Amino acid sequence: PRIVSAAFVASSSDPGKLPAPALAEVAFAGRSNVGKSSLLNTMMQRKNLARTSRTPGCTRQINLFEVAWTDGLHVHLVDLPGYGYAKRSRTEKSSWGPMLEGYLSTRGVLRAVTILVDVRRGPEEDDLELVDFLHALETPPRILLAATKIDKLSRAQQKPALEKVKRQFKGPIIGFSSVTGDGRDALWQRLRHAIAI
Ligand code: GDP
């Protein structure tokens, strides 16, 4: 199957103000500048539907996109605000703030969260804490991991780098590049699987 359309649906800093859950949703999270907007554009085969941020930490909103496939599948891709641009205080540590937590814990249609990490940096504290947060939810979504910007490494460097991230995360990981399109099909395959079950 192929994508027939991809469109922006809504944007809000208040999860309660997003359109009522109508379609299965898959969300994308990661540190600012990890390449999330670029990945979303690559996934949707659109140049600038998800705006790539010039100022890290500037896009403090949840953006919703709808993607339709030739086989009738409709899905919402959810662009969550990038984190990690400001150090959270100790008391905030367990808190992702009302926006992220509100979205992640109230959307019954949420099927999967893809956490993005830069392949050269691997997971950082925030990423691992998000994994813990998701595991602790009443109905945890499937967690997918994508290592971004793999084109920045040579082919020979990619495999050991991905193996390392995989060990740190203790789970499978998909290498992704918005420049070459590597990983796009593999990630869609996992997402479609998560939506179907
Ligand atoms: P976001 O803040 O997570 O949405 O990140 P962006 O998508 O805006 O990307 C941040 C920067 O990384 C931009 O300069 C992008 O051009 C660059 N970038 C994103 N994805 C890739 C990639 O796959 N390969 C390379 N080489 N650069 C990338």
Image (cartoon, helix red, strand yellow):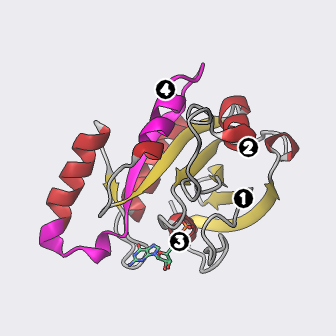
Q: How far is disc 2 from disc 1 in space, using C-alphas?
A: 9 Å
Residue found at x 56% / y 35%: 90
Q: Which mark is residue 38?
A: 3
Q: Disc 2 marks which amino acid?
A: Met
Precedes in sequence: disc 4 or disc 2 = 2
Q: Can you tell which quarter of the image residue 15 is in?
A: top right
Q: Is residue 38 visible?
A: yes
Task: Compare marks 3 and 1 and give the one earlier in the sequence.
Answer: 3
First reached walking from the N terminus: tag 3 or tag 2? 3
Q: CA distance from mark 4 to mark 2?
A: 18 Å
Considering the numbered disc 4 on the image, is that residue within a helix, a strand or a loop? helix
x 37%, y 56%: residue: 186
Seen in the picture, residue 67 relative to 178 is either above or below; the reply is above
Percent coordinates x, y for residue 48 in the rendering: 64, 78
Residue range in magenta is: 128-157
Q: Nearer the viewer, mark 4 or mark 2?
A: 2
State if disc 1 and disc 4 touch (CB < 8 Å): no
